[in-house]
Amino acid sequence: MNIEQLLGRIEDVLDDGTNIAFTSKMLVNVEEIRNILGEIRKNIPNEIDQARAIVAERNSIIDEAKASSSSMVEKAETRVKELVAQAQDIAKKTIDDADEKAALIIKTAEDKADIMVQASEVAKKAQEYSENLMAQSRQESEDILEATKQKAAEIFNEATRNADELTESSQRKADEMIEKATRWSTELRNATTTFIEDAMKNADDVLVSNVNEIRKVRQSIRDAVRSTKM
């Protein structure tokens, strides 16, 4: 039985007591009340153990929340590294493709220029055209390379920005989890402390009341014995 049930048994013993005629006193089973009080003393440590178990569970919840938040941050950091690596790979491939395309344009222009120079009838025009074509080809290749580099930089910056946002979001969620777990554990601890204090106070009040009642009963018995002798 718990303390509440044992206190109820004491009330039952008092209710079963016998009133002493012409007085406000009554006879009760003192031995049974003593037994119940002994069981109450035994159960008080159990109530304390239950409170300690609740506190231990609260600490376990906080530890789990911290471990979960740490795992989320680690996953976010890993994802950031993957995004940055992907952006670098894309930028490198884009620049390499641009270099190859520029080299192909220059090579084509040079081939055309060589063909035109070899034609003796239009050698001069071919030379001029080839020079213009070479200059134009170089300009186009430089423009393509510059545009590609800018695009690669934009891709890298976008990936970095997305990675930063992912990290901030994961950290924010982790902080919210820890805050909720800490708040819940504090509320649980406060409720447990209040419960124990109330239980101890009620037990003390009942014990004091029962001891006083027992003293009254003993005095009544003594008075009754004296009256019988007289």
Image (spheres, rainbow, N blue to C red):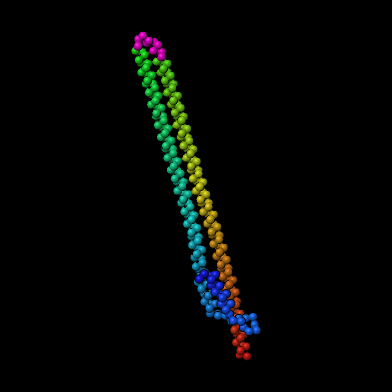
Q: Between residue 13 and residue 111, name the one nearer to us.
A: 13
Against 73, is 104 above or below? above
Residue 211 seen from this side? no
The main secondary structure of the magenta stretch is helix
Q: Whole-percent x and y of residue 165? A: 50, 41
**Which residue does the image show at 60% across and 76% down from the upper left?**
212
189 left or right of 101 in image: right
Residue most extreme to the right: 22
Q: Whole-percent x and y of residue 203? A: 56, 70
Q: Whole-percent x and y of residue 69? A: 47, 49
Q: Quadrant of residue 129?
A: top left
Residue 112 seen from this side? yes
Q: Whole-percent x and y of residue 136? A: 43, 19
Q: Is residue 121 magenta?
A: yes
How many numbered dots are placed on residues in this image? Answer: 0
Residue most extreme to the bottom: 230
**Which residue does the image show at 47% across and 54% down from the upper left?**
64
Highlighted magenta segment, given as a residue range: 119-129
The C terminus appears in which quarter of the rendering? bottom right
Q: Is residue 89 magenta?
A: no
Q: Between residue 55 and residue 123, name the one nearer to us.
A: 123
